[in-house]
Image: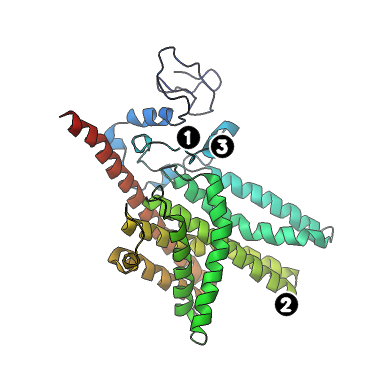
Amino acid sequence: MKCPECIYVNPDGVKFCLNCGEKFMRPENGDQDENSYFYEFAHYVDMVPKFERSVEPKFQNIFSRVFRNHSILEAERLFIVGTALTTPKIEEVKETWPKPWLFTRVFIIALVAFLGLFLGVSLFKNINFLPGLIIVGAFAVPFTTLIFFWEMNAPQNIAFYRVIYVVFIGGILSMLVALVFFNILKHNINPITIGIAEELAKVATVILFVRNIKYRYILNGLLIGAAVGAGFAAFETAGYALRALLSGSFSSLYSTILWRSFLAPGGHVAWAALTGAAFCMVQGDKHPELNMFIKAKFLRIFFIVVLLHALWDAPIPGIFPVGQIVLMTASWILVFRMIRMGLKEIAEKKGRVMISPMNEIK
């Protein structure tokens, strides 16, 4: 079916153009649910030969849609997923690697906003722009990274408003829990105890949000963890930026925001995403239990994250920024491995669901 607007050739039976979002006339004998926005994508995936549906990471394919033109309708459709009416059935979920693109647009918008605030402070000398400069500077990169995780959440079962809720409430709560741990530790504060306290605080906060049986996928744990980590990272950066301004100068403020923003994707956001995914991995379809913290699958990821965090904060010569860039790279290697595991989990669950009706017929 050729789109009359962009001439893109779509599979037969779709309701919207997969390229530009143009709505097609619905066939008279169509029996698809008008409330579902996922049939066209499921139908498209079903036309792909099975051997081409690999969930192995191919980075040139993952980011292949970043530089394409996208319609407003495409972005709007992304923001409606996750509700009771728009969460797809497991049979409709694609187990192939998602191709995120919206996160780059969010970053550009945040960058433009930051530059506008920067001009207000530096060019026009108006301090009324300072709060906005700190807030936008602190949230821009963590939030952009979070959008990437949201686009990678293949089950599409978490509404965007819920993600924002977790960023603010989860971010603040995890920081308060970490402070409680620090008060308990008192004089035993070092890079290792800091890593344990902060990562344990974040994963404990993640558990509050994944108690719902709806959020039991590994990819759900990645997203919820990233949301908690994004809030934690943004609020922490805002605090450090304010300290830099009060104790130094505007150059210290800009330097703090710049470096913490550059390193943010490999810090709290990635670490919390990994521990959140690890907990969902051991939780499965069960209710949260304390013994899940001592399961090998969870402890292995948790201790790796604590080690990364401890090395990040350690007073090792050359750790900033070269060492932290290396640690950031290591964190994202683990993130992509976890995404691959999450997609394989989707494929397995989808296969079991599709096999069950066949067994009932027999």
Query: In the rendered image, which residue does mark 2 sit on?
Result: 247
Please state if 166 lies on the left or on the right of 361 as rendered.
Answer: right
Q: Distance between the residues labelled 1 and 2?
A: 51 Å
How far across and down, in percent of the image, does residue 318 sit?
Answer: 51, 76
Q: Earlier in the sequence, mark 1 or mark 3?
A: 3
Q: Of the residues shown, which amino acid type is indicated by label 1? A: Leu
How far across and down, in percent of the image, does residue 348 sit?
Answer: 27, 44
Q: Distance between the residues labelled 3 and 2?
A: 42 Å
Residue 265 visible in the displayed image: no
Q: Earlier in the sequence, mark 3 or mark 2?
A: 3
Which element type, helix, strand or loop, lies under badge 2?
helix
Instruction: Indicate which label's residue lies in the foreground, 1 or 2.
Output: 1
Q: In which quarter of the image is residue 90?
A: top left
Q: Of the residues shown, which amino acid type is indicated by label 3? A: Ala
Circle 2 residues within 10 Å: few <14, some 14–19, many ≥20: few
Instruction: Indicate which label's residue lies in the foreground, 1 or 3.
Output: 1
Please state if 116 lies on the left or on the right of 7 as rendered.
Answer: right
How far across and down, in percent of the image, does residue 264 sit?
Answer: 55, 62
Residue 76 visible in the displayed image: yes
Pick the front one: 275 or 33: 33
Query: In the rendered image, which residue does mark 1 sit on?
Result: 85
> In the image, is residue 241 above or below residue 359?
below
Q: How far apart are marks 1 and 3 (CA)?
A: 18 Å
What residue is at 66 percent from the left and 59 percent from the top?
137
> How was the colour assigned to the protein in this rendering?
rainbow
Label placed on residue 75: 3
Circle 1 residues within 10 Å: few <14, some 14–19, many ≥20: few
Which element type, helix, strand or loop, lies under badge 1?
loop
Is there CB contact under 8 Å for labels 1 and 3? no
Circle 3 residues within 10 Å: few <14, some 14–19, many ≥20: some
Q: Earlier in the sequence, mark 1 or mark 2?
A: 1
